[in-house]
Image: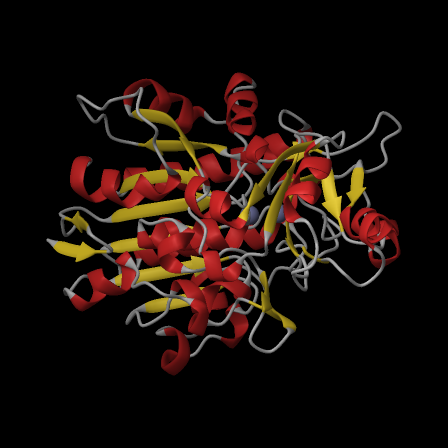
Amino acid sequence: MIDVNHRHYALPKQPTVVVCIDGCEPEYIAQAVAHGRMPWLARVLAEGTALIADCVIPSFTNPNNLSIVTGAPPSVHGICGNYLFDVATGTEVMMNDPKWLRAPTILATLADAGSTLAIVTAKDKLRKLLGHKMSGICFSAEKADEATMAENGIDDVLRRVGMSLPSVYSAELSEFVFAAGVALMRSACRPDVMYLSTTDYVQHKHAPGTLGADAFYSMMDNYLGQLDAMGCVIALTADHGMNAKTRMDGQPEVIYLQDLLDGWLGAAHARVILPITDPYVVHHGALGSFATVYLPREVDQAAVVKRLASQRGIEAVLTRAEATERLELPADRIGDIVVLSERSSVIGTAAARHDLTALDAPLRSHGGLSEQRVPLILNRRIEGLDTQRRWRNFDAFDLALNHAQ
Ligand code: ZN
Ligand code: ZN
């Protein structure tokens, strides 16, 4: 038994795999199953455990991956976006560095307790955070060719997996994660616990039930079936959902929040931060349904909150205190207000700062409350679970280690 962030976890008796499917709106699964493309999962849904859980807000990749591996919300682990306004230095910085992480992970604690661990991520940006202080195997598909024993606990990854290095913008980047997981489970270094985390390249481009989406979920079903056949306990969840964010003409439905606030307050007063911003913006143009805003002291905050809340396309506007309480966010890492847009809208900064010409498909994105529902599925039936309670994606390790073995 280990204790991590005030929750207990049993050590695994069977090889255990927790999978975070990036951007897995539950409908992707429903459509692929209905189209007969996920025979393994169809059986698991009938015979195992299938729940709908809430992810953490902002419904972005890093906060949720860190919640899953810490079993805790961002108020505990500190990672509340890809991007942060560092008040101390007055600069906008990436939150990829483990120095921002405030809590131990279940993975590192299991390794310390003697379990063998492996983490495979699609993009390299998550690798250092997820593998922080963990002894074991930890590498990304993106930089699989650069993996070394010293840095990643494994080398010669391309040969072991039997795939060439995938492009960072491809479905193969996620396929590589599964292929690596299966290769590791088959090999002599078979881990006791494995965490696999994909990328949402496919989900940003393809709606549920389309050819591109179904092909991706069919690929995944095949690899998951192989892990199941090897006797693994498998928990599947997602970091967030995904929705179309377009107007009727197919163009992105964007609320340019910096432009709006500059118009109300005068230029260079409010500072709008979009924590979705990262170096890989081609598929979403840095547009999501969550923003946080820093306001100068002299501005009437309550008046701004009220006026923003009445804007079309805005779902909720919260003060820092409300966001800390209701969304479990770290108070010192968010602005004075948090703004969430509705299901079909996204929030931008200034129109001039977003290059929408790079978008090669109608915008699909996430970040808001409308992308909070995610699957939480185990390939074992767990008797007596309360299906009416609020499940979270960060209950995945609890269910896998404490209830499914
Ligand atoms: Zn994601
Ligand atoms: Zn995304």
Q: Is residue 192 left or right of residue 26?
A: left
**Quadrant location of residue 398?**
top left
Residue 385: x %, y % from top left: 22, 24
Is 101 on the left-hand or right-hand side of 2? right
Q: Is residue 400 above or below residue 44?
A: below
Residue 402 visible in this rendered orientation of the protein: yes
Residue 57, image x and y in percent? Answer: 50, 43
Residue at image location 31% in from the left, 72% down from the top: 133
> Please, which colouring scheme is shown?
secondary structure
At 63% across and 24% down in the image, what residue appears? 209
User: In which quadrant will I find the C terminus?
Assistant: top left
Residue 6 is left or right of residue 142, and the answer is left
Identify the residue at the far bottom of this view. Answer: 150
- Vertical relation: 381 (above or below) 149: above
Q: State the image quarter where residue 266 is shown.
A: bottom right
Q: Which residue is painted at 39% across and 53% down in the image?
A: 75
Residue 43 vertical placement versus 393 (above, below): above
Q: What is the number of callouts on the image?
A: 0
Instruction: Give coordinates of residue 217: x percent, y percent.
Output: 54, 34
- Camera-side residue of 137 and 176: 137
> Which residue shows up at 34% across the image and 54% down it?
69
